[in-house]
Amino acid sequence: MHLSLSQKRWVFDDFDPVKTRRLQIEYGLNPLLAQCLSTVLQHQDPQQWLFPSIEHLHDPYKMKNMSVAVERLEKALRDKERIRIVTDYDVDGTTSSLILQSVCRLLGGGELIDYHIPSRFTEGYGFSVVAAQKAIRDKIKLIVTADIGVRDHEAVRVAAEGGVDVIICDHHLPAGSSVPDAAVAVLCPPQEGCLYPNPALAACGVSLKLAQALLFRSAKWKDRPNVVWKIIRSMLKVVAIGTVADVVSLATIENRSIVALGLAELQDMRSHSVG
């Protein structure tokens, strides 16, 4: 019998002793850890599970509507349109805001970008009609939401009717629900017709994929992929925090890589600052 730190009893009902022993020998694992992995791993490669890599980040263009979202943001930056990032007020939302603001500024957005984080006391949860109306008054041309928006049909409609385009980066979609028709693009892995390999991304992960797609298309870094990967690695510090805080599944190789690499980057930054 094995007890957890909280003195709960761990029960392994279904594990393969041969697979457990092979994992233990091949990777030099503690017997209990090998038993845990043998239970968790189905058809996944143990090598990927134990050694996450930047190469495990999927192609962002596998996400439904990614090309449309990238093209609309590129147009906004090229035409000097005002862009507002609107996100939830929790850790996933605020880290998403930081990622989206950063990539827009890296691509020359500068003074074009501002942000809005709704007050839970005056606006409640989500992308509200109040926020849409404020954007219209402020002459915003493009709103990018994160961690909110996919269920806010009315606010998206109001924004669109007022001449404000909306791109949604979200992951909160109940099974069978539709996404707002009035949005220019909805990036949400659980939506119908999206074949993205990792349906468990947090909103900050979806925001990272949009940033990844934008950066690799940028004329500034198009022929310098190593620079882009360095930028993405730096962003992983923030995305790891949002991913862990939102308690999304780490059973997918991409989420595990985001967290493992992001935490390593944070540790590296701390070591350099201390040194």
Image: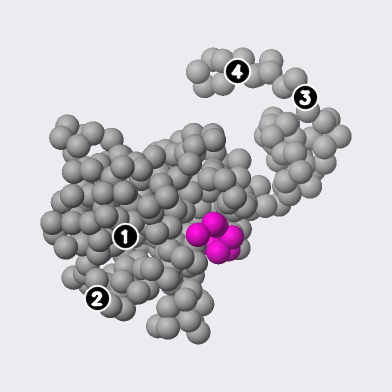
The disc, 1 or 3, on the residue closer to the chain's N-terminal end is: 3
Circle 3 SS class: loop
Label 2 or label 1, whichever lies nearer to me, is 1
Q: Earlier in the sequence, mark 2 or mark 1?
A: 2
Above or below — where is 199 with respect to 209?
above
Select label 1 or label 3 by which is in front: 1
**Where is residue 187 shown, x and y percent of the image?**
46, 53
Q: Amino acid at mark 1?
A: Asp
**Could you tell me which residue is drawn at 18 percent across and 49 percent down?**
133
| Element marked by disc 1 | strand
How far apart are labels 2 and 1 at the CA level? 14 Å
Q: Nearer the viewer, residue 127 or 109?
A: 127
Image position of 103 with respect to 122: above or below: below
Circles 3 and 2: CB distance less than 8 Å?
Answer: no
Where does residue 210 sit, x and y in percent of width and height? 44, 61
Marks 4 and 2, Cα distance to the nearest angstrom? 59 Å
Q: Earlier in the sequence, mark 4 or mark 2?
A: 4
Foreground: disc 4 or disc 2: 2
Residue at mark 4 = 3
Tell me which segment is drawn in magenta.
59-65
List the residue tagged with mark 2.
Answer: 80
Task: Confirm or deny contact between disc 3 and disc 4 (CB under 8 A).
Answer: no
At which x and y percent is residue 50? 65, 48
Amino acid under label 4?
Leu
Q: CA distance from mark 1 to mark 3?
A: 51 Å
Residue 178 % position (x, y)? 48, 41
**Which residue is at 43% across, 68% downward?**
70
Of residue 174 and residue 51, the one placed in the foreground of this image is: 174
**Going from the N terminus, do you reach mark 3 or mark 2 first?**
3
Q: Is residue 164 toward the left or the right of residue 10 in the image?
A: left
